[in-house]
Image: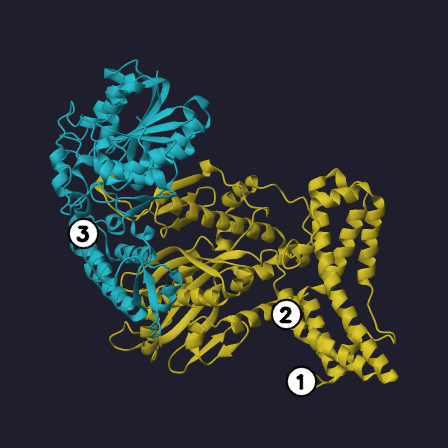
Chain colours: A yellow, B cyan
Amino acid sequence: MSFLILRKSLRSSKVTTQNPRISFLFSYGSPSFLYKTTEAPSGSRRLSHLIPENPIPPSGSPIYRHSFSGIYSNSLPSIKNLSQFRQSPVILTLFRYFGTEAAIQPSTADGLTVEGILASNWTILDESESDWKSHAAAIAQSIHLIKKRLRWKKLVVRLDLLSMELNKPDLWDDPVHAGKISREHGSLMGKMKQVRAFERELLEHIDMIKLAGEENDADMESESLKALVRMRRNSKEKELQAMLAGEQDSCSCYIEVQAGAGGTESMDWAAMVMQMYKMWAQQRGYKVTVVDEMPGEMAGIKRATIKVDGEYAFGYAKAEVGVHRLVRISPFDSNKRRHTSFAAVAVIPIMGDGSTRVQINESDLRIERFRAGGAGGQHVNTTESAVRIVHIPTGITATCQNERSQHQNKASAMAVLQSRVDQLEMARQAQMNAQHTQSLTDITWGSQIRSYVLHPYRMVKDLRTSYEVSDPDSVLEGDLDGFIMSYLSASIDKDEDGR
Amino acid sequence: MRLSFTSACCPSNFSIFTKPSLCTNLHRTVCSSSLSSLPTSLKPQVPLFLRPPVHSATVPDLRNWHDWAKNLASSVGTRFQDSDNGPDSSLLSRELKWLMEDAIEDHSVFSQLGIGNNQTNVRLKAGIEELYNLWKQRIEERRPFQYVVGCEHWRDLVLSVQEGVLIPRPETEHIVDLVADVVSDDEGLREGLWADLGTGSGALAIAIGRILGSCGTVIATDLSPIALSAAAFNVRRYGLQDAIELRQGSWFEPLKDVEGKLAGIVSNPPYIPSDNIPGLQAEVGRHEPRLALDGGLSGMDYLFHICNGAASMLKPGGFFIFETNGEQQCKCLVKYLGNDMRGSFRSLDIVSDFAGIQRFVTGFRQ
């Protein structure tokens, strides 16, 4: 940490040379480079033997990808319960009934709908202004955004499709398939109901306010107004939740940083980036563990992996995937020239138990002692007990050197390996679905996503969203949420527009 | 003659260990048992991380110490590595981090070390002067890190070690995996009586004691009273007093009552050829007990001795695994077991460690 202080005092600068080797480096450097690895036909073919084929035909719908867990997973009915439903056609009908009900547009007594509110273009004033139309318009806008983020139209279509599936009499002939359908249906239904309930609540309060106005009931009017303010605050939270509705968003994750070409300067930059994520994660209350760290010869790191434990760690951190560029006067250059350095960031979700994790066969692994040399055994006293595990069919490797025993290093490396293999498999499945190609480019790490300029001016700018901040120090100390949120909303909103 | 571990850990009762069997049929010189310059005692030392946090220091003081220690580690560069394959700066830096983990009660302090002038006191398990001394010993005297912090993380165990006790090696962890494989599908071995010869810190005995079934027992022997006191401490810390029995003596000598009854024998005996001892890495040669390293001229004195004994000590179908110096010793031993001791053993095998060095010889009693 004393590092950082030192660095800050050194941040200032002059001219630049962009290194053409960088793109090369990032295209072979990491096993997490999904596209490259999945393209290897032998790898993916062999991997596919390890996994049961997904019984649901690829639907082409993005909703499918976002359907199984996420924030509403609490409302998910368990398979066990659903197998009881199977016995009872009455309840199944009820299910469908709910489905239809949720799809009806709610409105006020005089026929005002949420879309109607939006269309009226009521001025949105500050929260402190007690104008119900302003509150209502703000809430309606949030609802609009939430729907957009949930890909509402697709969701409705998908839900209809699932309801039809659920009504087929032979559904439970294939219990695995039926289980998946019911879970997805339950999850989507949960999301839809939440939004509908929120809409109804808004419209009810409007009804109450109008009624209070007619009856001159000031108490009732102020009560409803307060309720609207509460809803308005609440809606921001819901906007955020809707952004993290992806299947793995709620998972913990690994964050990996790798230095680009350019020696000590870029290794120092990689260490700064890693430090930025450690601080960001700690500020968010996540638990941070260093899994693997390969220090540079002079300073910094060649690469490092940290584990970030906590709810939605992956959902947020995934926004950081890509190449991060630094421009500054290098403290390692005696001529005080300006340098440009790159560091690549990868983020891998750690899927919970019960998700579709790839079964790894012991016989497919090769385990090697890391940095071993000499006679070993009693000849050597060392605290270095790192192992490298190679998954032979995919060529994926993982190393852990931060634990204090070989056994623990092996266990940690194995956990990293498992997540990488899982991620590869998810990418493979997504790739089979042509429509996912667009969004997949977001999680490869070939592209530069952000620039950190310390000289000649000071600015951090996200190249994807154009979101920028003029205080690089705060960003490097982990103040990343602005970048993350703007990226997440932009990417989701862009996604929606493209469909 | 099961030892009471409360007394085993208390020096006043130590006479219980001194069986009149210090002379052996092998010419082991007990007096030269330790090359360490530091005094050794029979009282087991409590590892740093288990000591109460009765000391304290301010954040700036701790930072000063840390910066000093970090600089000292950096100043080493690759000097040790070049001279005797010792640790380089990056390894020493990691050890420094672990020393802090062991010495500091509240780990959230780490994040404050870089910034601010927080004058609050940090609770420590060793005084700041001791921390200066410990790190000086680590760098200047090449005292092994494990002796500095008084423990070695080995498999999922944290074992107390001190001068006079061999620090268990990562390679040796693999013996436990191989034993686990063997006992997983053989109830007779799982519920049987096992022996760990030359147990040292008790690492193998404890790890195997934890994978054996409810009736499985391990007898761990060692010639060194210091090693036995450390082993007793470790056995008690893992609550295995009922599963592990410690006996003092040379190899099979204290096991006469269980001849032909053992389900398994494991051992990591001294196997370094005497000629190699002077050239050892400083941490090993200067500090670890010679008794646990020196295997005689060829390095195989004790391996041969144990193999000979194993034939009579193992019950039919019993399993053995011994650690060796490498390919040469493995091949030599397999040849000896297959030819000179023909008919005694079956399924002889050589197993490599994760560095790819042929490290272990395994087999079963006919």
| Residue under disc 2 on the same chain as residue under disc 1 | yes
Figure quadrant of the C terminus of chain A: bottom right
* Left-right relation of A58 to A93: left
Residue under label 2: A237
Q: Secondary structure at mark 2?
A: helix
Above or below residue B58? Residue B280 is above
* Left-right relation of A153 to A422: right
Question: What kind of residue is marked 2?
Answer: Glu
Task: Check the residue under mark 2 and report the chain it is in.
Answer: A
Q: Residue at x 28, y 41 (%)?
A: B169
Q: Secondary structure at mark 1?
A: loop
Q: Between A372 and A306, which is closer to the camera in this rendering?
A: A306
Q: Quadrant of residue B294?
A: top left
Q: Residue A222's spot in the image, x, y percent?
A: 76, 81
Question: What kind of residue is marked 3?
Answer: Arg
* Other residues around mark 2 within 10 Å, as few (<14) / some (14–19) / many (≥20): few
**Circle number at residue A128:** 1
Inspect this view and state whether residue B78 appears. no
Task: Check the residue under mark 3 and report the chain it is in.
Answer: B
